[in-house]
Image (tube, rainbow, N blue to C red):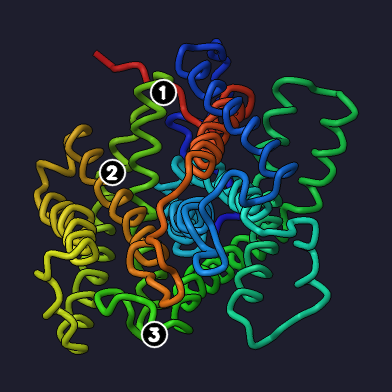
Amino acid sequence: MSGHPHSHSHSHPPVALRRPLWTPGVLVMLAFMAAAAVTLVVRFTGGIGAVSNLSNARPWGLWVAIDVATGVALAAGGFTTAALAHIWGRHRYETVVRPALLTAMLGYSFVVLGLLVDIGRSWAIWKPIFFQNHHSVLFEVAMCVLVYLHVLYIEFVPVVDEGLRDARPGHPLQKLVAAINRRLRPILWIFIVAGVVLSCMHQSSLGSLMLIAPTKVHPLWYTPLLPLLFLLSAIAAGFPMVIVEATLASSSLGTDDEMEVLTPLSRFTIVLLGLYLALKVGDLLWRGSWTSLLDGTTQSNAFLAEMGLGVVLPFLMLLRAKVRRSRRTLFIAALLIVGGVVLNRINVFIVAFTPPLSTTPYSPALGEILITCGFVAALMFCYRLAVTWLPVLAEKKEKTP
């Protein structure tokens, strides 16, 4: 492992982009954020019932499925690229580590904010730290996410140090961050390893949350393998998420398209997604629950959409070298995988879950949707701010004639 975990190939080092910030896209994000802000005020003054369709029978809805479970799964690019570049020493992938790390850091920050909105008494969110229930999966998730969020911020210190050194040399804040970074550098590898271990723990534990409800979760999804399936799907979505994000960044900000890194990266996805597909199919056959595949119910249709569009189709696409080499088709395949994971988390936590007490089926209220959209917009806005002022992305390389 290299002495400096954030060393990168000299071909195109990351730079602060200094692009104009107030683009039409950013203004749209601000509109979503404003709508969410108003809804949040209503939620914290009028209670959780004022903005959501959650009830005692259905305490988990859109916020848990999207803001928490999906947010955590899609931030997996942070630990998968860190493991690849730093632990397995594949330094050619260094260029995608920083944007993946930034996405993970922002993703987890918003997971915590999502939890604050979703927990009825959010002022009591600190209690698990002191009143520990070592038999609770939720306790393990809470502690892992708490620690991992700090690990991500620590891993990002070298980037902030570099950005301040370029923008404000000699400023007191810059000196402070530089001093912290100097102390951190010899032990940063510990945090990188810890990040990978913690991620594997809570990615799988999110699946374990539903093991407690065998009678309430539809047989197409309920399996003792849920923790393993959650972990594998998050790992399989890690690199596609990096591909989606790099493609969006390069098309909207005119940065380097990184195709020489993304094409080989997508080959790992074939193996990881294939492994997930094999396990999923094997599990259906082993439990005999494949019989409800063609029921025509909402659940079986949702399952077919999740597997067909989110796993099988992109898997077949990625098998073709032509798809992996084309920026557009690679982006489409990666987007399908990411969409598949989003659909899987929605399916497990909402579609598959039918508690006997609920008389009416749950559908998210407008307030829930507004807050979720606002959080996604805020995450994108923070990403935009970060790449504008910090060296995260690489500029476009000049084509040599």
Whole-angstrom CA distance, mark 3 to mark 1, is: 48 Å
Tell me the tag on residue 335.
2
Classed neighbour count for the residue bearing mark 3: other residues with Cα under 10 Å, few (<14), some (14–19), many (≥20): some
**Residue drawn 38% across and 47% down?**
241
Residue type at numbered disc 2: Leu
Classify residue 253 by image quadrant: top left
In the image, residue 289 lies at what x, y percent?
A: 18, 82
Q: For the N terminus, give its image quadrant.
A: bottom right
| Vertical position of residue 246 compared to residue 74: above or below | above
Left or right side of 218 for 297: left
Left or right side of 40 for 11: left
Left or right side of 241 for 331: left
**Residue drawn 40% across and 52% down?**
363
Tell me the tag on residue 138.
none
Residue type at numbered disc 1: Thr
Does residue 5 appear in this view? no
- If you read the primary sequence from the N terminus, does the residue marked by circle 3 or circle 1 appear first? 3
| Vertical position of residue 46 compared to residue 174: above or below | below
- The residue carrying mark 1 is 255
In the image, residue 170 lies at what x, y percent?
A: 86, 24
**Residue drawn 63% across and 63% down?**
145
Q: For the C terminus, give its image quadrant.
A: top left
Tell me the tag on residue 214.
3
Does residue 146 appear in this view? yes
Classify residue 351 by image quadrant: bottom left
- If you read the primary sequence from the N terminus, does the residue marked by circle 3 or circle 2 appear first? 3
In the image, residue 28 lies at what x, y percent?
A: 48, 19
